[in-house]
Amino acid sequence: MTSRTFYHRLFVSIMFLAGVFGILTHGVARPLLKSGKIEESETWSGLVEITGDITIPAGITVTIMPGTTVAIRANSDDQQRGGDHIIDEITNQDPSARAEYTRTHISIDISGSLVAAGKHDQPIRFTSSHPFPRHTDWDGIKFLKGSSGILKHCVVEWAHTGPALHDTDDVVVSHSIIRHIFWGGLHAFRNQPLFEFNYLDDIGHEAFDTHRASPVIRHNVILRARNAFVFNHYHVQSGKPVVFEDNIVRDCSNMGQLQENNYSMIRRNIFVGSDRKIGPWVYQGFVLDAEPHSVGMGLADNVRVTIEDNRFAGISGFPIYYERIGPNGGIGHTTKTPEPFEIIGAQSVRIARNVFWGEGAEPSLKMLREQIPDIEITRNTIQPPGH
């Protein structure tokens, strides 16, 4: 082979490889980089990489097209805005509740409008940029006072906190997947939102969390959450209860907590426990641990609740039990003796037409009668395990 022939073949090979590379890379756009305040309404599509805290101010709308991936840079924030999370007796030892965490982890804060309406076969994904993601890679999505929006056919994952709705009734979260979350899955603060047809999995605190709110929560599937829900004070201004209906709760450590001054309707749900331990959820050595098996639904002081037409199975101990409030407003110790104690304020509990599988149901209902004056327990069915 002459040198001329060799170089000719080398040139042809290089051009061929260059052509193949061009074909493979043609149409692969660079990600749209976003950070800071959004100054005018805009549309996102394709791959969007978030490098710092996003602020969508009042009057501005961000629309995200179906099939878009919003990749949030993990453990990084070029805005370094910061700010504490809610600090209470549960979170005061948690380093992810501190400003040091929020200064280095990205938050998407909406005072205007975020319209993320995906499709069944083209979901919108909010995810970590890290190849090996963890539960706290980014902070979360917050709808603030006066905001509006849609999260439909979306996936929100690997965040510290799932979507949180503050002082707005104009946001709907539906047909979405919320998973791999360190704190709570979906949050309602001082409002009455609608959460429906969502799938929540691997949640370190509670799948649904309410504070002075009365959301409608229906047709959701909740898996592997430390608590299926924690309902705090209801939305007093509206006088409406929290409505939790037609949901499936499975393999959660705790079937739910009704905290002090809560008003709820819990009906037509399926609660299935497990003897498999879930978790733990870990950040910088701080561990959110779970019970070694599923426990029941706790009722605190001064609750008004109707629990009817539900199914309870696979729960260790009592499927429904009464708890005292701790000194700082959190759940204290479980009362597991028939000794009655003082009820604070008005109390109204109705447990009707439920079906219970398991040996703990009968003593549970007996103890509730002894602990709560004027409780109504009627037309419930108790089945032995395995039936």
Image: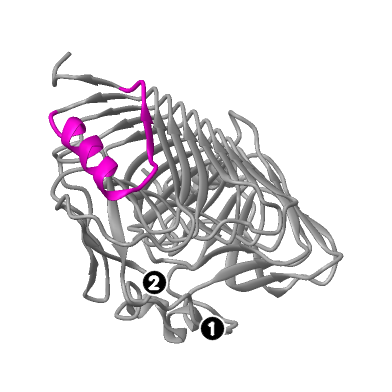
**Callout 2: 10 Å neighbours few (<14), some, many (20+)?**
few
Marks 1 and 2 sit apart, C-alpha to C-alpha, by: 23 Å
Instruction: Identify the image's colour scheme: rainbow, by chain, secondary structure or one colour.
Output: one colour
- Tell me the kind of residue under disc 2: Gly
Q: Is residue 119 left or right of residue 382?
A: right
- Tell me the kind of residue under disc 1: Gly
Using the image as rendered, state which of residue 133 and residue 148 is in the foreground.
148
Q: Is residue 331 above or below residue 77?
A: above
Q: Quadrant of residue 58?
A: bottom right
Q: Which residues are magenta?
A: 359-380
Q: Residue at 47% across / 80% down in the picture?
A: 104
Q: Which mark is residue 241?
A: none
Secondary structure beneath disc 1? loop
Q: Residue at 29% across / 62% down in the picture?
A: 324
Q: Residue at 14% across / 53% down in the picture?
A: 337
Where residue 366 sits: x, y (%)?
21, 37
Q: Nearer the viewer, mark 1 or mark 2?
A: 2
Residue labelled with disc 2: 329
Q: Which mark is residue 83?
A: 1
Q: Is residue 171 above or below residue 301?
A: above
Where residue 261 sits: x, y (%)?
49, 59
User: Which corner quadrant holds the N terminus?
Assistant: top left
Q: Quadrant of residue 26?
A: top right
Look at the image and say whether residue 362 sits in the magenta stretch: yes
